Image (tube, rainbow, N blue to C red):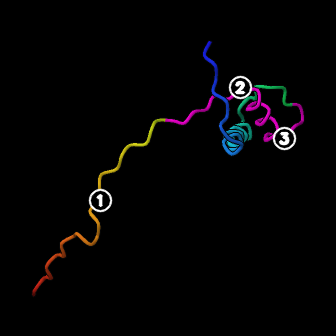
């Protein structure tokens, strides 16, 4: 069985839990006993028990190189 990566920061834990809490508020079924607890508490417990899949996503794609404004050639003015 593949081991899930641990959270690398408290900030990421909060981000993942916030996303999960939003899902719970929209009607997702909790993965732990929710009782009368608020969705944020349920989401944090799910994250702490590593029940939520998360990841970094695909690596960012490199952007095309931009020409600095100082190297751009000015366009000639139109003459009427």
The residue shown at (45%, 38%) is 59
Q: Residue 67 placed where, x, y %? A: 26, 62
The disc, 2 or 1, on the residue closer to the chain's N-terminal end is: 2
Q: Does 33 sit left or right of 68 as displayed?
A: right
Q: Residue 79 placed where, x, y %? A: 10, 86
Quadrant hosting residue 2: top right
Q: Residue furthest right?
A: 36
- Identify the mark at residue 7; answer none if there is no mark: none
Q: Is residue 67 above or below residue 55?
A: below
**Residue 21 versus residue 72: which sits nearer the camera?**
72
Mark 1 residue element: loop
Q: Is residue 2 above or below residue 72?
A: above
The residue to which callout 2 is attached is 51
Q: Is residue 7 above or below residue 67?
A: above
Q: Residue furthest top?
A: 1
Report the Cα–Cα distance between label 2 and label 1.
43 Å
The residue to which callout 1 is attached is 66
Report the Cα–Cα distance between label 2 and label 3.
17 Å
Queried whether the magenta region covers residue 50, the answer comes back as yes
Q: Are marks 1 and 3 in contact (CB under 8 Å)?
A: no
Queried whether the magenta region covers residue 67, the answer comes back as no
The residue to which callout 3 is attached is 38
Q: Quadrant of the N terminus?
A: top right
Q: Are marks 2 and 1 in contact (CB under 8 Å)?
A: no
In the image, the segment drawn in magenta is 35-57
């Amino acid at each position: 069985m593949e081991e899930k990566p641990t959270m690398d920061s408290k900030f990421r834990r909060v981000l993942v839990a916030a996303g999960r809490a939003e899902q719970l508020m929209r009607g997702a079924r909790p993965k732990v006993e929710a009782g009368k607890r608020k969705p944020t508490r349920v989401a944090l417990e799910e994250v702490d028990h590593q029940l939520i899949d998360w990841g970094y996503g695909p690596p960012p794609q490199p952007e095309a190189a931009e020409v600095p404004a100082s190297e751009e050639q000015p366009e000639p003015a139109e003459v009427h």
